[in-house]
Structure formats: structure tokens, C-alpha cells
Amino acid sequence: AHSGLGVGEVVWVLQHPPEGEDQGRRKVWISDSSMQNVEGTTFCGQGVLQDGKDPDNTDVLELRTAPPHLTMSVEMIRRSQETLEAILEHLKCSTVPVDATLPDEERIAAIKMTPLGPILRKLLPVLESVMARLINGCTHSNEQDPILRTGPPNAAHQELLRQIGTVETCLSIVNHLFDDLHIPTPTVKRDLPLLWKASRLCYKLVEMACFDNPANKLHIAHHVVGFMKHTRAEVGAYFASVTVYKDTKSLLENMYETNFKMYRDVIVTSRSSRILEFLSVTVKCNGVPIRKNQNIVADMILDDMKKMIYKVEITEDDILLHDISGLLIENDTFNKYREMTPLEAAPKPPPPPPP
């Protein structure tokens, strides 16, 4: 019991893992709903640890009042989270998916006949206001445009976005708009601008929440394959993916062949050059090669060479890859290339000129 805390105060919980566990110190928050202003104020154990395992009798917890500026951040993010959850629920209850088997143009025409447009027109001003506060809080800067804002990271704000569940809610909104409704990605920016704006804000939040924040990167990494499906929509999915993995040694060194196989499959189905650019991020960390990843990417490309030959077309909004498998490389040429014939020795340099 801790009688020195009143209703409405935000408390940090610092958890020290049991001896021998390879686990970092965790700092999470208790909302005022976990406190009762009665004699010997008590704290509810259920849901105390928002980020990590449930507490047990081997855990050591320290409770202390958070600084005032963090108290304000917690309350702002909590209220924003409630708004985002309400937006997500409204979208799920009110929108109608289109037939995923239709060609892209017919799907776009079909989605325009559903209530999605009027719903987004009503919700977007609220979403823009909420997301501006959440995104801008991730960095220290005078820039007020959330899409353009950069600067040193505000780690406490970023961690709260993860702990309170705001990052996950933003991803749920994007996944519902694209995946559940079967929206084709290539022409979203042109044909469904309200959907594009909403998704762009959600991915920008993910990007900035992970900016120079190892814990958030680790938390989001398993979503990156899903990001790749949205790269053609130009909603920031590529930049969020790069922010998660670029120069993040712990993630890059723990990528496996199954990860790369999923990326290869997305290349084949989506024809997005952004995924090829992302693969170039995975083979080095701070300029130092990661041999395991280099070998996997090289083997993947060589094994599926015919499936990964494309004609490049640069359009106003994108770089498109058109499949021309089998047109440039005959079987004999391909097989000789796979045999990896030895390289010829480089010629010796000419002797230096006489003095």
C-alpha cells in the first residue's frame, strides 16, 4: 500500500528482472484507474505491466510519481488512443469490402460506391488533429507539419506510444483500410486521396515512433513484411520499414531465410522496386557487411533469377517493374551463370614511368 499518491497521478513502474534473465529494465505506467483514493491506496496488479510479461513473485517493482511533463504526455496519448480506437471501430462497423478478384480499376470503382468516402471525409479532420500531436511529440523541433518534422528523438514519448498501444492501433487502421477492404495500392494516391492521407499519417507515426528507438524497432519488426504490401501506395510504408531495420544490428543479425523468402514473394506479386531497395538495407549495418544476409540475398536472386528479371519503367509517381522472365536469358546462359565460373586474374599494373 502507498498512501502518498492521489487519484489522477501517473506512476512509473520500474521492473528489475530476476537474476540471470537477459532482459532490460522495463519502465511502464499505471493509469489512475489502477488507484483508489482510500486509506492505504492500493494498486491493481492486473494490467500493470503494459509492455512485457505479467509480474510474478520473483519480480521487484519500484513505484514513483512521474514528472509533470510526462504526466501530461500520458494523459494526451491516452485520450488520443481512445479516439483512434473509436475511429477504428467506426471503420470496421461502417465500411464494406470489395471483391478481391476484380481488376484494380473495377475495385476502385466499387469502393467509390461504398460509404468509405463520406466516412473518411468526416473522420479525417479528427484524425489529422490527433496524429499531428502524436507525431510531433516524437521529436524535438519547431516544425509543426507532422510529415516534414525531424529532430532529436523524444524517447519518453516514443515509449509511451508503444506501451499504451497507439502504434498497434495505427497499424490496425492501415491494415483494415488496405487489406480488409481489398483496396488496390498502385493508384490510391490519385483515386482515393482521403484514404491515402489517413494511411500516410498512420505510417508516419510508426516511422517516428521507431526513429532511433531500439525498443520500438524490436516491437514493430514482425510487422514489416505487412508494410511491404503497401509500398506501391506511397503512404510511407517503405520509409517505416527502413527506419525499423536500417543500422539496427540486433535485428539485421537475426534475420532468417524465412524472412527473406517472404520479401521475395512480395517482390514477385507486387513488382515494387522499394522492396529491392529494402533488401539493400538488410545486407549491411553502419557500413559493415553482414555476410549471412548477403549470402541469403545473393542465393535468393540466383535461384529465382528468371522470376526476378524486370523491365524498369519510371512513372510520375513510382518506379514500376514489369515481368519479362525468359526473354533476356536463355537456359544455357542462365545455367552457365549459376555455375559461377572463376574470375580471371586482374592484369598487373604497368611499371612506373622512369624518373
Image (cartoon, grey):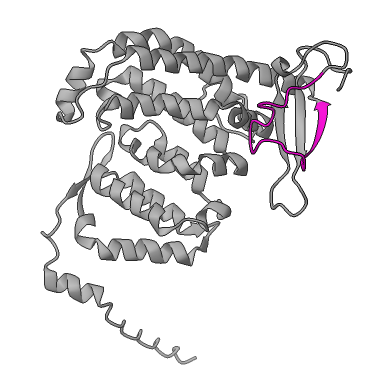
Seen in the image, is 73 located left or right of residue 274? right
Query: Is residue 119 found inside the magenta-colored segment of the image?
Result: no
- Residue lying farthest front? 57
Percent position of residue 19, x then y? 78, 51
**Between 226 and 316, which is closer to the camera in this rendering?**
226
Residue shown at 46%/92% (left/top)?
Answer: 354
Query: Is residue 57 found inside the magenta-colored segment of the image?
Result: yes
**Between 231 and 227, which is closer to the camera in this rendering?**
227
Seen in the image, is 199 located left or right of residue 317? right
Q: Quadrant of residue 53?
A: top right
Percent position of residue 303, x then y? 26, 65
Can residue 143 be seen in this snapshot? no
Point out the image quarter for the N terminus: top right
Seen in the image, is 311 located left or right of residue 135? left
Q: Which residues are magenta?
A: 42-64
**Between 155 and 89, which is closer to the camera in this rendering?**
89
Q: Is residue 278 above or below residue 27?
A: below
